[in-house]
């Protein structure tokens, strides 16, 4: 039950922040703006923090690994932006997605950057 609540809370926080952004802002614009605008960088970083905590909870509670960050590695705002930007470079069409897709793209970027090996 708590897992469902945590995932719902994550979705609510992502959609609330995304709703504050103008609809015309795309993922590519968000990344570009984040180099000079701390708010935009924090938007990426805080979304990543929510995903990171949720995936840790799912791992501990259910034994399901979604993103496998090595050991004691801490992902800051800039690092989250950089691996998202690298993920976007693999498929430029992702740059045109609306900022409301940020959470989903960060999960995909996290899985691509920190894949889990099969047991």
Image: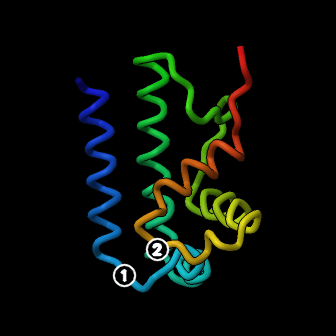
The earlier-in-sequence mark between 1 and 2 is 1
Where residue 23 is drawn, which disc sits there? 1
Residue at 71% x, 46% y: name it: 113
Secondary element at image label 2: loop
From the viewer's perspective, is residue 6 above or below residue 109? above
Q: Residues within 10 Å of mark 2 (few under 14, many from 20)?
A: some
Image quarter hosting the N terminus: top left
Residue at 56% x, 32% y: name it: 66
Image quarter hosting the C terminus: top right
Nearer to the camera, 72 or 84: 84
Where does residue 55 sit, x and y in percent of width and height? 48, 34
Where residue 106 is drawn, which disc sits there? none
Asked if the residue at tag 2 contacts the one at tag 1, i.e. Cβ–Cβ closer than 8 Å, the answer is yes
* Numbered-mark total: 2
Residue 100 placement: quadrant: bottom left
How far is disc 1 from disc 2 in space, using C-alphas? 7 Å
From the viewer's perspective, is residue 9 above or below residue 26? above
Secondary element at image label 1: loop
Residue at 65% x, 36% y: name it: 69
Residue 34 placement: quadrant: bottom right
Residue at 64% x, 32% y: name it: 68
Nearer to the camera, 71 or 85: 85
Please give the residue where the numbered disc 2 appears in the rendered image. 98
Q: Residues within 10 Å of mark 1 (few under 14, many from 20)?
A: few
């Amino acid at each position: 039950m708590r897992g469902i609540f945590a995932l719902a809370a994550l979705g609510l926080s992502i959609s609330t922040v995304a709703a504050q952004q103008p609809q015309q802002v795309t993922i590519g614009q968000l990344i570009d703006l984040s180099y000079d605008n701390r708010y935009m960088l924090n938007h990426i970083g805080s979304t990543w923090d929510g995903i990171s905590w949720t995936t840790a909870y799912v791992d501990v509670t259910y034994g399901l690994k979604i993103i496998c960050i090595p050991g004691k590695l801490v992902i800051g705002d800039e690092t989250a932006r950089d691996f998202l930007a690298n993920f976007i470079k693999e498929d430029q069409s992702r740059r045109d997605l609306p900022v409301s897709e940020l959470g989903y793209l960060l999960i995909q970027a996290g899985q691509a950057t920190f894949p889990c090996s099969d047991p």
